[in-house]
Amino acid sequence: MSKRNEDWWPNQLQLDVLDQNARSSNPLDDEFDYAEEFQKLDLDEVKADIEERLTDSQDWWPADYGHYGPLMIRMAWHSAGTYRTVDGRGGAGGGRQRFAPLNSWPDNANLDKARRLLWPIKEKYGQKLSWADLMVLAGNVAIESMGFKTFGFAGGREDAFEEDKAVDWGPEDEMETWDRFDEEDFLQEPLGASVMGLIYVNPEGPEANPDPEWSAERIRTTFSRMAMNDEETAALIAGGHTFGKVHGSDDPENLGPEPEAAPIESQGFGWEREDTDGPVKGGEMITSGIEGPWTQSPTEWDMGYLNNLLEYEWEPHKGPGGAWQWQPTDESLEGSAEPAHDEEDAATPMMLTTDVALKKDDDYREVIEEFQDNPMKFGMAFAKAWYKLTHRDMGPPTRFLGPEVPEETMLWQDPLPEAEYDTIDDADAAELKETILATDHSVSELVETAWASASSFRESDMRGGANGARVRLRPQRDWEVNKPEQLSQVLDTYREIKADFDESGEENVRVSLADLIVLGGNAAVEQAAADAGYDVEVPFEPGRVDATEEQTDAESFEALNPRADGFRNFQADRDDRPAEEALVDKADLLGLTADEMTVLVGGMRMLDTNYDDSDHGVFTDEPETLTNDFFQNLLGMETEWEETDEEGVYEAYDRDTGEVVWTGTRADLVFGSNSRLRAIAEVYGADDAEETFVNDFVDTWHEVMTADRFDLE
């Protein structure tokens, strides 16, 4: 196989993560509208087809207990459970469990069978039902078919057709290893799972030690990284483990290669038994290496899991698959569980180290004891936690589709109030822009405020953005990158403008602070372009509203606090990535392409928006003027660059005089050093390209300002 560029130069900046935003690998027509197609489905019919499939056991993969429900729950859980709050990546969106590396993770062993079992459903409904929606819906139907009422289901997840190259799954070189903790057992960011190739934690216990107390610590860390508190965590574990069993009945050495390593004739099937001829039969299945059910009736919703865990004592032992698991010390449970296949082969309930952890940890134990005493509370907690798990990465409810979307909006969905007034029109917007520009605030201050508000958006989980004006609330107003003191002054001015406008305008016309913040940024960009000799108008769509503190989970929003924002030349001490890599990561979260990232950085530098008011990258004698000076002065050969004693900072020396003329960071110099970014920069640095640069900056600026306006789609 021929070598790729990254093989020759492994430290090369990986811009292909932005190519995912630039091109479509989707084989569907450009005019295809998934939301429109999904609405054509009869969801009751789809669910009936899925439920029928759940009990249609196939010889090529026999159903435990004659019911595929537990397998489908595991598939849905593992599809959604990759979500992590730190960068919003992972989750069920895109249906990326179909692609490497997720399709071949050890924790996803045999989920290829679950998806193949669902193929007749997908085949029947075609593009009206994405794999991403189908996997979650199958989990819901499975739960309901076994006697539990779910909280609801929302469609709207579109399919991806390749893996997400932007996700950092961890530093390890081998699966089921754990080089992601420091000496104090802190899990490095942005990771959520504690082990490479697992969704959450090692079921045997941390580093394969059956230590429940340590396991509880790891559980709390990983589930909190995935947006779950103690009650939600306990509810998910207890509710999920009420169903099904784990598989590890004999030597795991007999397990064949994962799908990505399987031979071509396997057609994407992995983990096949290498010591059997033909299909596996019942107890021959191997998945985790741990063997047994949690309850006596694994295909029924009941209190069996909590009763078994709390009312019996458990001791660790090596199970038949050679892995640590827990067995009851009381012989009364022996043989009490329904057999999975052979009627003569009754089983004994078992527990994982992660189950016993709920009993040994004081806080978790308090929760599960309350659940045991109050089954209704347990049921509601599981229903809501499952709904959150499977919908957390979808963004606000305005994106949710279908007849089963709950009426209630949860705090984790970042609710927004309904506007009880008429929004401003074009004439009002023009008048407000004049008022804003007449204040004492500079172009850079207005731009920085708008950017601080809008650039909090993450396309990964559709959170953040300008709508709601949460930049004025904790925690965003206190973030270092947002210049809290300056931000407060600009917001005070906007509050005065809003009050005057609302009092003096038409009877029911009001302007939100959210709209004012964006409008002020637009006005500043237009002014900077005019000062450069270009008459431009930044598009503006009113309709944003102002969220309240009660609608804002401050702790949850802290996850949006950027570790780096190369557009403002910011990088926090906790971020040890090269600045150019952090810049690309931020651009990807904003959904930008490589050329959009380039034009934005060039414009932001000219608008003088560095978070610390430094001159790094401000390669111009006319700051706050939207020229293409950044590119011309970076690309020109009149200067040469040298690294300074300050880490990540460089100085440009005039070749003739030897004087320092500019300073820059790696987030600036990368546009001259990286061959691909230089090629883009050269387009904007040409003498005849300034107008193109201004227009492209305006278009990209508008894209960021409206990234969260799902109501405009």
Image: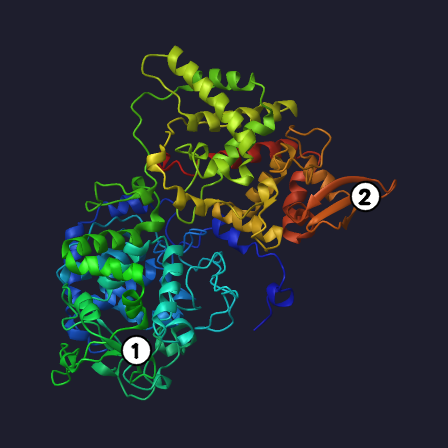
Residue 653: which disc? 2
**Could you tell me which residue is drawn at 66 percent across and 53 percent down?**
674
Q: CA distance from mark 2 to mark 1?
A: 65 Å
* Coloration mode: rainbow
Q: Is residue 348 left or right of residue 132?
A: left
Instruction: Residue 599 in the image: state x and y as whole percent.
Output: 59, 40
Task: Give the residue at mark 1.
Answer: 325
The quadrant in which the C terminus is found is top left
Q: Residue at x 19, y 65 (%)?
A: 306
One can see residue 164 in this view: yes
Location of residue 675 in the rendering, given as x and y in whole percent from the top left corner: 66, 53
Q: In the figure, 467 relative to 578: above or below?
A: above
Location of the N terminus (image quadrant): bottom right
Residue 442 drawn above or below residue 712: above
Secondary structure state at the residue bearing disc 2? strand
Q: Left or right of 160: which side holds 331?
A: left
Amino acid on which disc 2 is placed: Tyr
Relative to 623, is 661 on the left or the right?
Answer: right
Give coordinates of residue 596: x percent, y percent: 55, 42
Label whose residue precedes the other's in the sequence (2 or 1): 1
Local SS, label 1 = strand
